[in-house]
C-alpha cells in the first residue's frame, strides 16, 4: 500500500480522501463497471451535512451528473437508501433518487430490491422499519447481468413438469432459482463481525450479490460515499478492482486498516448465510415469566 497525499493505493484499487464532487471529475470516463453506494441519507448521522430533503436532493443530483459518464455502457448504478422521517411523515428516499435518475434517458431501472433485516429501532407510533432499498439502473439497454452467479437453491428441487412434452422431467434450473427482489441479509449492528465505528455500514454480503451479478471478473467497482469501504472489501473478495471516495478523515483512515487486514487475511467477513436463531436454553432465548 502506498500513501499519496490524499489517497491509499493498493494492488487492486484506491481509496481517495475528499469530497466526491471534486474527486469524481478526475476519474476517467467509461471506466467503471458498477457504482454501488449508500449516500448520506439525512437520518441525523454526524456526517449528514445536508439534513434536509432539499440538501439530499442537491447532493444526489450533483453526484449523479458526475457519475453517469464514469460508467461504461452496459454497466450498472445502484443507489442504496432508507426512509426519512420529518414531522412524523415518512418519505422513502428512493422516491427522491428515482426522480433524479429519471432525468437520464440512458439509465434504465431494472429492479427495486428490498433489503430486509431483523433488527433496528423500535417504533412506538408506527411499524418498526425493517428494510431499506437498492435501486438498480443500467446504462443502456444492453447490460451485464450474470443471474447464474446469484441463484439460490430451489425450494422444491424435485418438482416436475406436470404436462406437455417434458411431463415427468425435473422442471427447475439445476443451478438454482432466481433470488427474487426481496433479500434478507442481517444488517451490521452490535455483534456483527463486520461492525466498525462507522454508524451506518452495509454488509459485505449485500454489495457482493450486486458485484457478482453486475461485473466481470477483474471489473471495477466505484463507491463515491465509501464510509469504511465495505464495497472495496466485497470487491476484493470477488477478484474485482475498486475506487472508493470518502469525505470524513476518520473513516478514510480506518479504511486503510480494513483493507490492509483483508490483504493480511485477518479481515472479518460474515458469510452470506441466514441469521441463526439463538440456541434454546441460553439466557437470551429464555422467555421471562411475564412475557407472552
Ligand atoms: C451511509 S455512509 C456509507 C457507509 C458505507 N456503505 C460502509 O459500509 O461503510 C455515507 C458516507 O458518505 C460520506 N460522505 C458524505 N458526503 C460525502 C461527499 N461529499 N464525498 C464523499 N463522501 C461523503 C460520509 O462521511 C459517510 O461515511
Image (cartoon, grey):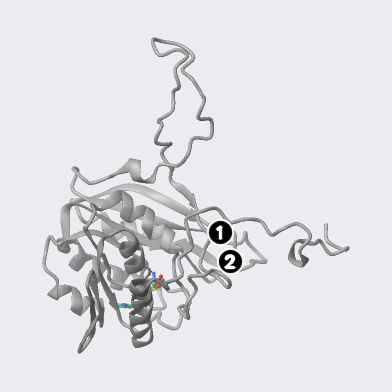
The image shows residue 3 at horizontal and vertical percentages of 23, 86
Image quarter in which the C terminus is found:
bottom right
**Ligand 1 picture quarter:** bottom left
Residue sitting at x 62%, y 59%? 127
* Mark 2 neighbour class, 10 Å CA radius: few under 14, some 14 to 19, many 20 or more: few
Q: Can residue 227 be spotted in the picture?
A: no
Give the total number of marks visible in the rendering: 2
Q: Residue beneath label 2, please?
A: 120
Q: Earlier in the sequence, mark 1 or mark 2?
A: 2
Picture layout, residue 47 above or below residue 180: below
Determine contact: label 1, label 2, CB under 8 Å: yes
| Residue 188, image x, y percentages | 51, 68
Residue 166, percent across and down?
A: 40, 14
Is residue 291 left or right of 47 when viewed as pictured? right
Q: Position of residue 142 (x, y in %)?
A: 18, 43
The circle drawn on residue 130 is 1
Amino acid at each position: 500500500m502506498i500513501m499519496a497525499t490524499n489517497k491509499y493505493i493498493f494492488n487492486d484499487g484506491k481509496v481517495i480522501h475528499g469530497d466526491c464532487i471534486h474527486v469524481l471529475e478526475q476519474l476517467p470516463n467509461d471506466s467503471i463497471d458498477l457504482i454501488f453506494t449508500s449516500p448520506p441519507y439525512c437520518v441525523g448521522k454526524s456526517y449528514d451535512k445536508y439534513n434536509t430533503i432539499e440538501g439530499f436532493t442537491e447532493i444526489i443530483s450533483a453526484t449523479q451528473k458526475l457519475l453517469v459518464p464514469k460508467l461504461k455502457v452496459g454497466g450498472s448504478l445502484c443507489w442504496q437508501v432508507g426512509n426519512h422521517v420529518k414531522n412524523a411523515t415518512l418519505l422513502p428516499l428512493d422516491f427522491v433518487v428515482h426522480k433524479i435518475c429519471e432525468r437520464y434517458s440512458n439509465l434504465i431501472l431494472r429492479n427495486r430490491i428490498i433489503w430486509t433485516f431483523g433488527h433496528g429501532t423500535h417504533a412506538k407510533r408506527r411499524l418498526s422499519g425493517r428494510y431499506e432499498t437498492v435501486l438498480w439502473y443500467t446504462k443502456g439497454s444492453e447490460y451485464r447481468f450474470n443471474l447464474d452467479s446469484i441463484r439460490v437453491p430451489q425450494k422444491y428441487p424435485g418438482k416436475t413438469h406436470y404436462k406437455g412434452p417434458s411431463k415427468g422431467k425435473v422442471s427447475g434450473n439445476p443451478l438454482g432459482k432466481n433470488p427474487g427482489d426481496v433479500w434478507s441479509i442481517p444488517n451490521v449492528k452490535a455483534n456483527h463481525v463486520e461492525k466498525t465505528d462507522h454508524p451506518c455500514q452495509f454488509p459485505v454480503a449485500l454489495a457482493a450479490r450486486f458485484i457478482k451479478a453486475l461485473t466481470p471478473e477483474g471489473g471495477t467497482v466505484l463507491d463515491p460515499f465509501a464510509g469504511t469501504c465495505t464495497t472495496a472489501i466485497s470487491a476484493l473478495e470477488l477478484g474485482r478492482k475498486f475506487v472508493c471516495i470518502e469525505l470524513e478523515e476518520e473513516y478514510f483512515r480506518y479504511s486503510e486498516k480494513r483493507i490492509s487486514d483483508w490483504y493480511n487475511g485477518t479481515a472479518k467477513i460474515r458469510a452470506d448465510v441466514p441469521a441463526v436463531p439463538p440456541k434454546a436454553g441460553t439466557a437470551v432465548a429464555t422467555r421471562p415469566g411475564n412475557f407472552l
